Amino acid sequence: MQINIFSIQKNNNNEFSKIDEYYTKLIKKFCDFNDICIFNNKINQAQNINATEAKKSYTNALTPYIKGFCIALDERGKEFTSVEFAKLLQDKNGISFFIGGAYGFEQEFIAQMHTSIALSKMTLIHKFAKTMLLEQIYRAFCINTNHPYHK
């Protein structure tokens, strides 16, 4: 199985990096895994214009990576329990997760996904959302393999 996380993020070096590295190492025991941060001048300029332009720039940057079973993190997405999330990931060859920038996603981008999920009804900073997602991916593998991590 291949899992990719694509995020609109300036860099992956932040206060959550050590936790992210920890869960990434654990996830890699179960699958091929990539965490890809995307940020460029077009995104930076668009974010300084308005939300509409920012969302368009996210779509343009992320669309080439749409392949396999695609899941967008979106505040309007479906909420899952950890067990439900584990079932969602079962029997997939490739899964791509998408984390948008500060303004979220265009509806046209969301429409290209197999599903969208919300990690919480609360608004989360993107760095923390990625950390939560990594932990839940690891937990899903543990649930699906009857590992004792999920109690």
Image (tube, helix red, strand yellow):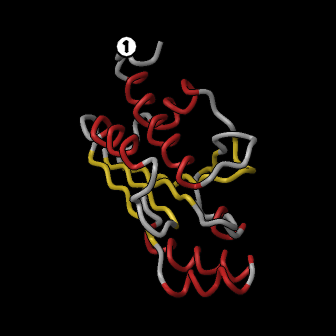
Q: In terms of secondary structure, where does tag 1 sit?
A: loop
> Where is residue 58 drawn, in percent x and y?
58, 74
Residue at horizontal 37%, vertical 56%? 35
Q: Is residue 63 above or below residue 128?
A: below
> Where is residue 141 drawn, in percent x and y?
38, 29
Residue at horizontal 72%, vertical 49%? 123
- In front: 3, or 49? 49
**Residue 53's quadrant in the figure?**
bottom right
> Where is residue 86 drawn, in percent x and y?
49, 30
- In front: 133, or 141? 133
**Residue 23's quadrant in the figure?**
top left
Please give the count of numbered marks on the rendered protein: 1
Name the residue beneath numbered marker 1.
148
Q: Is residue 91 above or below residue 127?
A: above
> Where is residue 100 drawn, in percent x and y?
59, 63
Instruction: Specify the amino acid type for callout 1.
Output: Pro
| Quarter containing the N terminus | top left
Q: Is residue 47 above or below residue 21?
A: below
Residue at horizontal 45%, vertical 35%? 135
Q: Is residue 15 above or below residue 143?
A: below
From this viewpoint, which residue is outermost toward the front?
A: 15
Residue at horizontal 68%, vertical 37%? 79
Callout 1: 10 Å neighbours few (<14), some, many (20+)? few
